[in-house]
Amino acid sequence: MTLSGINIRRLIALINKEFIQMRRDRLTFAMMIGVPIMQLLLFGYAINSDPKQLPTAVYSQDNSTYARSFVSAMHNSDYFNIASEPKTQEEADELIRRGKVQFLIQIPPNFSRDLVRGERPKLLLDADATDPSATGNAISAINVLVGSAFNHDLTGPLSHLRQNQAPVELVIHRRYNADGRSQYNIVPGLIGIILTMTMVMFTALAVTREIERGTMENLLTMPVKPIEVMIGKIIPYIFVAYVQTALVLIAAVSLFGVPFNGSLLIFSLALFVFVIANLSVGYTFSTLAQNQLQAMQMTFFFFLPSILLSGFMFPFSGMPTWAQWIGDALPLTHFLRIVRGIMLKGNGLSDITTELTAMAIFTVIAVFLALSRFRQTLD
Amino acid sequence: MHDEAHQAPPLENGLAINVHGLSKSFGERTVVDNFEMQVEQGEIYGFLGPNGSGKTTTIRLLCGLLTPDSGDGTCLGYNILTQSRQIKRQVGYMTQKFSLYGDLSIRENLDFVARVYELPDRINAVNDTLRKLNLTGRAEQLAGTLSGGWKQRLALASCIMHRPRLLLLDEPTAGVDPKARREFWDEIHMLANDGLTVLVSTHYMDEAERCHKICYLAYGKLLARGTVEEVIAQSGLTTWTVTGPNHKRMMRLAHDLTGRHGIDMVAPFGATLHISGEDGAALEQAISSYRNDPDLSWSKSAPTLEDVFISMMNDAPDNFK
């Protein structure tokens, strides 16, 4: 029973042993099944690289048939979801600055009068271009729309307006990222990705390693309190997080020319909340995992939805509602919005309150979980 | 630390450990069952029993690493249920497995322990310990690269650095060579001379014989306790030693004798057999037909501690079965 020096019986013994060990490690086994299913569901159902139903605000200063036709044409295109109709310019600007809407369409006063006169009135489309991939297809769609949206209304004596060029002039204003450079979106986002990955993994491994090597038993017999152990594990990684962030930021600004429009102080504050959230998640994992491999797997299980559903890789607004709920529960989603808001849009503290609060709630829950899971005994 | 040491409650009847009715189960399995232990201050108390008999669990219950399901008592005068923080400060616990940081140097490990116990004059405390252990030359070596004997010395050093009043040693000499073992025990006796109480679990009979008192635990139950002589006397075991010409002859004899009425145990030691039984008369009856064999020389001897323990182990019900 040999095959070029390989003894089949010995080989079978090894394979058999491997299967037995695989079956014993329940968590690994669950991961082998769970991860592909999770990926399949997320990529299959949640991710959409052609996002539709993007939240749009309409600031109409001309309440006419033509204006209404255009809005309903936008709505019918499926790319735009008319989420709000601000009454003032300030209100409209705030909606886009805070990221409540992706697009703002402005219909100027006397729109219909100018249209009928054939003066090609301007239609102003403000796009939040921090994520160029989210807006690209919708902008193409609206370009087609302006040519055809009025055809139905422009009949009889006005039918000549349907000839040649579009009856209105569409002015597209890509805010915050005029050139549509994807680095502007990805590089700040990477801060969040890198931190989620490293912070969760480092703490999960650091604590599990103590248990695996038996040093936790020694630590528990010494006069240290659980809270001291936890804080002692976390603080070094807070330093690591700030160093990592500084590196990415320096690279972002110097190599990729990403602007930093907001306040570094506010940024540091948001970063702190985010880092604590991730470290607490890692700490909680470490109290559940029996060995470092399991800790790694749990990290992966948390990292995967974070990277896919946070709006980092794929536009958040393109995801179905259930996926957005999951995304909203993850701290990375809010952190990405904050980072992009501060760096690209120059958001102040008041603009990011909602996101900061959401992230803080997650952090409080995670810290509480981590603390309640820590055992002072080996029971 | 020193404040708490001053306020230490008086020991009950000079007992460093005084616990009763201690029980602990994990799931269905009772690992420690209605356990009782009294250890006097300054005593070296040997803790013996087969693997899985609950020695480690008992030690963990004593120092507050585990919470007992029932039972109570005191350790250094502190209540084991409610005052485990105070107990921890005055107990040195050496785990069975090396549990210092392998990726820290010897000095860094000792420095860490000194900081956690808030030792005054930390730098000197660490240097003194290094000197005492002859480790000064290797202070910067990583603990993980030390050999077994040195690891064990380092572990002992780290758990006596804060001057505990009670040492709990869980199989401290497993896998350590005889010379290092001898030195380790000399050290333990010196510490006990200074008033330190030591509870040490072991599988080595020579170590058990170096203890002031011993107790024997099997499957969660206490089977015997007292001085070595007392335990041997209490066993009621009779042992005959028989020496023959060669080991082949003796193996045949061992085979013939095993299982006979009155013979509980036959153990070969080279060309010598130890034959033991609880019923002395029945044992003599069983061997009588071989007594006159000119090749064999018989003598009635006191059972060794090992004979006693193996006989106890055979009698004890295994809770896995």
Image (cartoon, coloured by chain):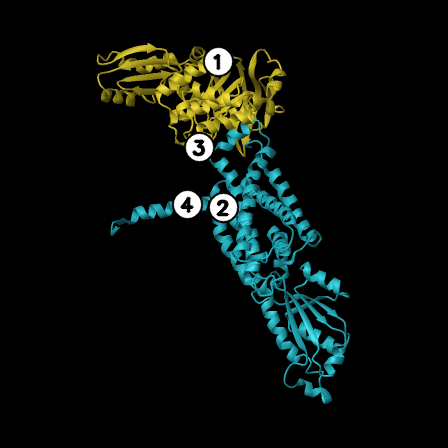
Chain colours: A cyan, B yellow
Dot 3 falls on which chain? B
Amino acid type of the residue tagged 2 in the rendering:
Met
Residue to which mark 2 is pinned: A296
Q: Nearer the viewer, residue A209 or A145?
A: A145
Circle 1 residues within 10 Å: few <14, some 14–19, many ≥20: some
Disc 1: which residue: B192
Same chain for marks 2 and 4?
yes
User: Looking at the picture, which amino acid does disc 3 mark?
Assistant: Gly
Residue topped by disc 4:
A20
Rendered view: A15 above or below A110: above
Q: At numbered mark 3, what does the secondary structure look like: helix, strand or loop?
A: loop
A101 relative to A278, above or below: below
Question: Residue under mark 1: which chain is it in?
Answer: B
Q: Are marks 1 and 2 on the same chain?
A: no
Q: Which one is nearer the viewer's eye here, A279 or A349?
A: A349
Subunit ID for the residue under disc 2 = A
Q: Nearer the viewer, residue B109 or A289?
A: B109
How far separated are the C-alphas under marks 1 and 2?
46 Å
- The 10 Å Cα crowd at callout 2, few under 14, some 14 to 19, many 20 or more, is some
Q: Residue B92's x, y, as percent?
A: 51, 22
